């Protein structure tokens, strides 16, 4: 369903049922399918119920932009399910150039803020995951340690397709695999993680002022970030 299409509501009742390997949404008696026509089977009832709520909330006309969770579920099934190796490779690419590892020059105000706010998160991820990232001052690329990238690959391979889908959304929005990995923790403060990802944008706004378009973009990213984090939470078994 393209976002430019106008589609009238074609169902009356919305419910959740059990499916092979999980749960699915039923529109009247018909199970929902993904854009590639695969069964939209999700791992938890809580996620299925949240997906059902999106369908139930539609009025006479369906608003495609309101299906934030559905889009993540479709991505997990259609994209990650068929391109799992490629998805992990893309995530590793973010790890190789992680925003949190690239700092301003020592002595600059931006550097002091990055050290104070990014470094604790980066160290916590390193301690939890058991590897080390290279920090770089300036924009010149420096490769991450081979052992770090190997451990990251092993770590990502342990994640199911739904977790990878949510993680990919978070990492794409933050340009940081470390931020994404931190968001996987049950007690993660999602608002704080988004603020860390936006540290440089916020600093530039302090220096040069804010404009309505930039504020709107930031608001949209924050909403998308929160939706991806919610998808991850709802996808967790147990």
Image: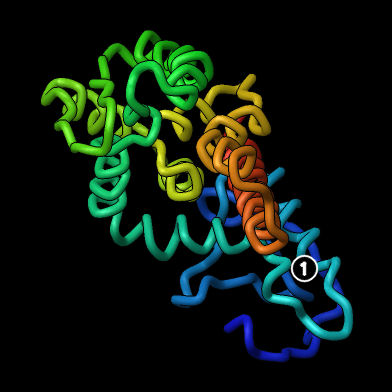
* Picture quarter with the N terminus: bottom right
Hey, which residue is sitting farthest top in the picture?
127
Horizontal and vertical percent position of residue 191: 68, 33
Position of residue 215 relative to residue 25, above or below, is above
Horizontal and vertical percent position of residue 106: 34, 18
Which residue is rendered at x = 40% and y = 12% of the image? 123
Q: Is residue 44 visible?
A: no
Hey, which residue is sitting farthest left in the picture?
146
Horizontal and vertical percent position of residue 44: 62, 43
Instruction: Indicate left or right for 146 with 234 as reference.
Output: left
Q: How many marks?
A: 1
Name the foreground residue: 46 vs 129. Answer: 129
Which residue is rendered at x = 64% and y = 51% of the image? 218
Which SS class for mark 1? helix
Horizontal and vertical percent position of residue 94: 31, 42
Which residue is rendered at x = 56% and y = 72% of the image? 33
Instruction: Indicate left or right for 218 with 103 as reference.
Output: right
Q: Quadrant of residue 196?
A: top right
Name the foreground residue: 138 vs 120. Answer: 138
Name the foreground residue: 39 vs 107. Answer: 107
Which residue is rendered at x = 65% and y = 90% of the image? 5
From the image, tell me which residue sits under label 1.
55
Position of residue 131 relative to residue 56, above or below, is above
Q: Is residue 169 visible?
A: yes
Position of residue 64 relative to residue 197, above or below, is below
Q: Quadrant of residue 216?
A: bottom right
Position of residue 192 relative to residue 85, above or below, is above
Colour style of the rendered protein structure: rainbow
Crowd class of label 1 (few under 14; some 14 to 19; many from 20; radius 10 Å):
many
* Picture quarter with the C terminus: top right
Q: Quadrant of residue 72?
A: bottom right
């Amino acid at each position: 369903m393209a976002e430019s299409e106008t589609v009238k509501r074609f169902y009356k009742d919305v419910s959740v049922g059990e499916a092979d390997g999980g749960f699915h949404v039923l529109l009247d008696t018909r199970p929902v399918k993904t854009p590639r026509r695969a069964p939209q089977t999700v791992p938890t009832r809580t996620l299925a119920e949240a997906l059902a709520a999106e369908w139930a909330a539609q009025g006479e006309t369906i608003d495609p932009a309101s299906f934030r969770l559905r889009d993540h579920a479709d991505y997990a099934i259609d994209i990650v399910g068929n391109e799992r190796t490629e998805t992990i490779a893309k995530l590793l690419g973010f790890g190789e150039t992680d925003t949190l590892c690239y700092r301003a020059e020592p002595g600059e105000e931006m550097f002091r803020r990055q050290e104070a706010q990014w470094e604790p998160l980066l160290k916590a991820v390193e301690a939890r995951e058991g590897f080390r990232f290279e920090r770089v001052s300036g924009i010149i690329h420096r490769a991450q340690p081979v052992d770090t990238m190997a451990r990251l690959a092993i770590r990502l391979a342990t994640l199911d397709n739904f977790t990878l889908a949510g993680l990919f959304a978070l990492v794409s929005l933050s340009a940081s695999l470390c931020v994404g990995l931190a968001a996987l923790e049950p007690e993660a403060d999602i608002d704080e993680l988004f603020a860390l990802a936006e540290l440089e944008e916020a600093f530039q706004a302090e220096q040069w002022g804010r404009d309505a378009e930039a504020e709107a973009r930031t608001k949209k990213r924050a909403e998308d970030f929160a939706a991806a984090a919610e998808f991850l939470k709802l996808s967790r078994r147990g």
